[in-house]
Image: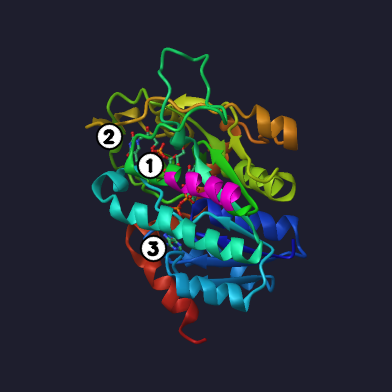
Amino acid sequence: MKNILVTGGAGFIGSNFIYYELEKHPDRRIVCLDALTYAGNLETLEKALKNKNFRFVKGDITDRKAVEALFEEESFDAVVNFAAESHVDRSIDEPEVFLKTNILGTQVLLDACRKRNIRFHQVSTDEVYGDLPLDRPDLFFTEETPIHTSSPYSASKAAADLLVTAYFRTYGAKVTISRCSNNYGPYHFPEKLIPLIIANALEGKELPVYGEGKNVRDWLYVRDHCKAIDLILENGRLGEVYNIGGHNEKTNLEVVKTVLKILGKSEDLIRFVKDRPGHDMRYAIDPTKIRNELGWYPETTFEEGIKKTTQWYLENRSWWENIMNGDYVKYYEKMYKNR
Ligand code: NAD
Ligand code: DAU
């Protein structure tokens, strides 16, 4: 594969994937299409923009005309769709944009790909399976677990997944889907639990923990997710779903306390706040299929990954401070004003 379109590449996982691909496949060209919503940050792609194999295009995946124009201009071998509204709390306040971007945007990309017989990979989430009870540690999400969504976010991601599989069956589109558990690592937007806790703790601010902090998430270092997508793109079976997760289950309170310990900050910063409506209790992935079929395994333990991540936020303070104070939205102007 020579030319790959990565949508949503100015966000957390998409940007990590772009860096992974540029490093792993130096002969590969990556085009990033991103609308630069509040979650997109061109500063994140600063190093990629210096690479001759990388091109950034500002554009919306729901804009059919713009997407068609880009597909006419470029000759893509594959598309990896990260572009999405991704924050559960925002979906509870304002669901509509989630339906538009996550469902209709996916359809626009699917149409562009199937017409040209281009390989399409949909980056989905374990949240499409709903949640598991805390008192059944023997249960895990497999690819056969029924879709059973809780939030407008997860419902929109599930709807997109169903469209992808429908395009496979009806049109023979060349598709795969991956469903990953919670990621953490560099460039994670500080509205999500781990980066929010690190940033707030460093600024001596309160750390909001929903409910009693007993909800469990299955954390995966973002580079391990990128490696899995790269493998699926190369060797995944068309029409298949692959679950991605590394058996790193932690309660939210455990995560928060771990971060505080690494930073040497006091647990007095913790504040138990009103719970998220419909809050999923536990996510836990069974990654047997991707391990057996593609040889994937996670390289980073939670203990290592959380230390590396905390260190990254310490060393890249201006990156998240620019987000916290809104400066990052000016970056696009700064980067492009002389072009
Ligand atoms: P993010 O919110 O950090 O980034 C999303 C990116 O998509 C941003 O750069 C944003 O500008 C862009 N975008 C949004 N709407 C767009 C549109 N209409 N057109 C073009 N670009 C648009 O998200 P993330 O955490 O990096 O998640 C990426 C993908 O991975 C999402 O599809 C999400 O559902 C999925 N996922 C995330 C996690 C996680 O833990 N963060 C886990 C599993 C799956
Ligand atoms: O499982 C994959 C999903 O993980 C992805 O599909 C989503 O895009 C991604 O945002 C993430 O969803 P979560 O809702 O699990 O992530 P979030 O970081 O928002 O919250 C993690 C847990 O921490 C969750 O139980 C809610 C809780 N929480 C979150 C925030 C922001 C808090 O207790 N306090 C907070 O301030």
* Classed neighbour count for the residue bearing mark 1: other residues with Cα under 10 Å, few (<14), some (14–19), many (≥20): many
Cα distance in 3D space between marks 1 and 3: 21 Å
> What's the amino acid at mark 3?
Thr
Residue 47 seen anywhere in this rendered image of the structure:
no
* Classed neighbour count for the residue bearing mark 2: other residues with Cα under 10 Å, few (<14), some (14–19), many (≥20): few
Q: In front: 82, or 334?
A: 82
Cα distance in 3D space between marks 2 and 3: 23 Å
Q: Quadrant of residue 260?
A: top left
Spot occupied by residue 219 in the image (x, y as percentages of width and height): 52, 33
> Which label was assigned to residue 276?
2
Q: In this rendering, would 177 be left or right of 257?
A: right
Residue indicated by mark 3: 37
Mark 2 beta carbon near ligand 2 (under 8 Å): yes
Mark 3 beta carbon near ligand 1 (under 8 Å): yes
- Against 192, residue 65 (above or below) is below
| Residue furthest bottom in the image | 338
Residue at left offset 69%, top offset 74%:
52
